[in-house]
Image: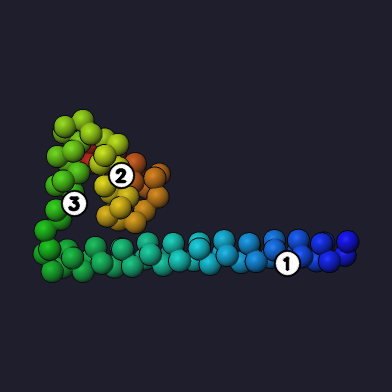
């Protein structure tokens, strides 16, 4: 019985560690995306994804626009929805 408790505590520790690492990776990705966006603006790279999203929004395909932005930007559902909503205004 002691081994089950120890194994359970160990498994919980590994799970918490994995969650921490995933969170750190997500924040790194956000930071990299911000840097890439700044570089793209300075290099005057056209923002084709925004144009595509605006086209989808004008056609009433909001869900498709959110999905497309999630894939392109690597963000979560909430962030993608907020971005698409900001383009609607």
Q: Are marks 1 and 3 in contact (CB under 8 Å)?
A: no
Q: From the viewer's perspective, is 23 left or right of 7?
A: left
Tell me which residue sits at (25%, 41%) in the image: 65
* Residue 67 horizontal/vertical position (percent): 30, 44
* Residue 38 horizontal/vertical position (percent): 23, 65
**Rendered view: 10 above or below 78:** below
Q: CA distance from mark 1 to mark 2?
A: 37 Å
Q: From the viewer's perspective, is 32 left or right of 18?
A: left
35 or 9: nearer the viewer: 9
Tell me which residue sits at (18%, 65%) in the image: 40
- Quick one: label 2, few (<14), some, or many (20+) residues within 10 Å? some
Classify mark 2: helix, strand or loop: helix
Q: From the viewer's perspective, is 51 left or right of 5?
A: left
The image quadrant of residue 86 is top left
**Which residue position holds label 3?**
49
Tell me which residue sits at (12%, 63%) in the image: 45
Q: In the image, which disc is placed on residue 67? A: 2
| Residue 89 in view of the camera | no
**Rendered view: 40 above or below 87:** below
The image quadrant of residue 43 is bottom left
Q: Are marks 3 and 2 in contact (CB under 8 Å)?
A: no
Q: Quadrant of the C terminus?
A: top left
Q: CA distance from mark 3 to mark 2?
A: 12 Å
| Residue 2 in view of the camera | yes
Q: In the image, which disc is placed on residue 46? A: none
**Which residue position holds label 1?**
10
The label nearer to you, 3 versus 2, is 2
């Amino acid at each position: 019985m002691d081994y089950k408790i120890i194994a359970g505590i160990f498994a919980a520790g590994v799970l918490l560690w994995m969650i921490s690492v995933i969170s750190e990776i997500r924040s790194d990705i956000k930071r990299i995306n911000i840097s890439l966006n700044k570089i793209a603006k300075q290099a005057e790279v056209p923002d084709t994804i925004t144009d595509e999203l605006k086209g989808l929004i004008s056609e009433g395909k909001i869900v498709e626009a959110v999905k497309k932005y999630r894939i392109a930007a690597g963000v979560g559902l909430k962030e993608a929805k907020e971005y698409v909503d900001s383009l609607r205004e």
